[in-house]
Amino acid sequence: MITREQVLEALSHVEEPDLKKDLVTLNMIDEIQIEGKKVSFTVILTTPACPLKELIANACRNAIIHMVDKEAEVTVNMTAKVTSHRNAADHLLKGVKNIIAVASGKGGVGKSTVAANLAIAMAQTGAKVGLIDADIYGPSQPIMFGVENEKLYVNERDGKQYMIPVEKHGVKLLSIGFLTDPAQAIVWRGPMASKALQQLFSDADWGELDYMFIDLPPGTGDVHLTLVGSVPLTGAVIVSTPQQVALADTLKGIGMFRMEQINVPIIGMIENMAYFTPGELPNNKYYLFGKGGCRSLAKELSIPFLGELPLVQSICEGGDNGRPDILDESSPAYASLLSIAGNVAQQVAIINATKQVAVSN
């Protein structure tokens, strides 16, 4: 007879590839059921977007067959409980497990496009996701999500009114663009912009979220300092294009997050517009802006390289039409976007494990 103890002993030899500890020690095994030669159990992943789920499942099956019974029929079920290292005493955004800034050193590198696609990709895995458009002077997320004409509603709780985020493509979204006339320029001094950003955090009913993405304005300034001073960031994703002028500004942005008084982990770098592939030559790649600039910089700075995205017309059109490219499985960028989202989730789980204060629910 196969016993529960034998199953746990076998699974104690299966290591979680990122966290470098076995599944039993990490309390990732649950609901073990044994009926004759049939064995089933659930592996609790640290994120539904885990890119290594098949690798882990296969390792579990092999462990049971080789260490318990070669005739065992093994069923591995997968679920997820997103981790966090946020302090339970945090009152601002207390229902949000991970807060991720999406930043760039300069404008025009596709940061907002990447933020929109990442948020939707995470939501497609089953995670609860929110997105704040913190680009106060040039909000673009309402257009990218096709909700520029949406009106905001409020809930009243404990005598205070809270904005209800707009929901689209599985993502809760708030932007200063919902509160201003899109035809008018936003001419605010730094303190006004900072206060507006704080209200998107404190005066909104975000509920429970696994991941909140914050689309920052380019560069380094008041909004960035307000962000790191207002909420505990899990980390920052840096977006750049390959050419040296973009990388020079990117280096400054990374330097800001690494300043001692700020000290925000860098989740990784994404290289946007990495290459061009013509529709009639799908196997050809033309590196219009140089090759591998972000990958080289990431290696130099010991930062994870999360992936590269091609320069394709569908990404631009998707943003303009309110249907980001991740919604089109036939897009040349679809597989890359999914992979990058998985890599972001993977690095967030590693950061949370390193903090050693995992909070889950």
Image (cartoon, rainbow, N blue to C red):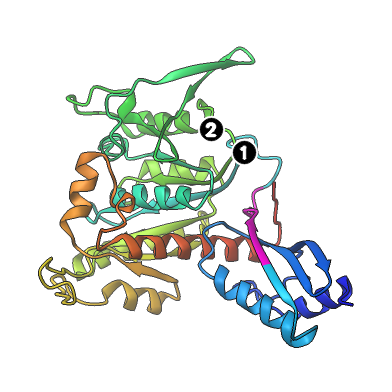
User: What is the CA distance from the residue labelled 2 to the residue labelled 1?
Assistant: 8 Å
The residue carrying mark 2 is 206
Q: Tell me, yes or no, whether the highlighted magenta stretch contains residue 77.
A: yes
Mark number for residue 95?
1
Is residue 128 at least partly visible in the picture? yes
Amino acid type, callout 1: Gly
**Label 2: few (<14), some or many (≥20) within 10 Å?**
many
Along the polypeptide, which appears first: circle 2 or circle 1? 1
- 142 displayed left or right of 268: left
**Label 1: few (<14), some or many (≥20) within 10 Å?**
some
Residue visible at 54% across and 60% down?
348
Mark number for residue 310?
none
Give the magenta part as a residue range: 76-86
- 204 displayed left or right of 255: right
Give residue 296's quadrant in the image: bottom left
In depth, the one of 52 and 309 nearer the eye is 52
Q: Percent x, y for residue 184? A: 18, 24
Q: Percent x, y for residue 268? A: 43, 65
Q: Tell me, yes or no, whether the highlighted magenta stretch contains residue 240.
A: no
In depth, the one of 97 and 309 nearer the eye is 309
Q: Percent x, y for residue 20? A: 66, 76
Residue visible at 46% across and 28% down?
199
Residue visible at 58% across and 37% down?
93
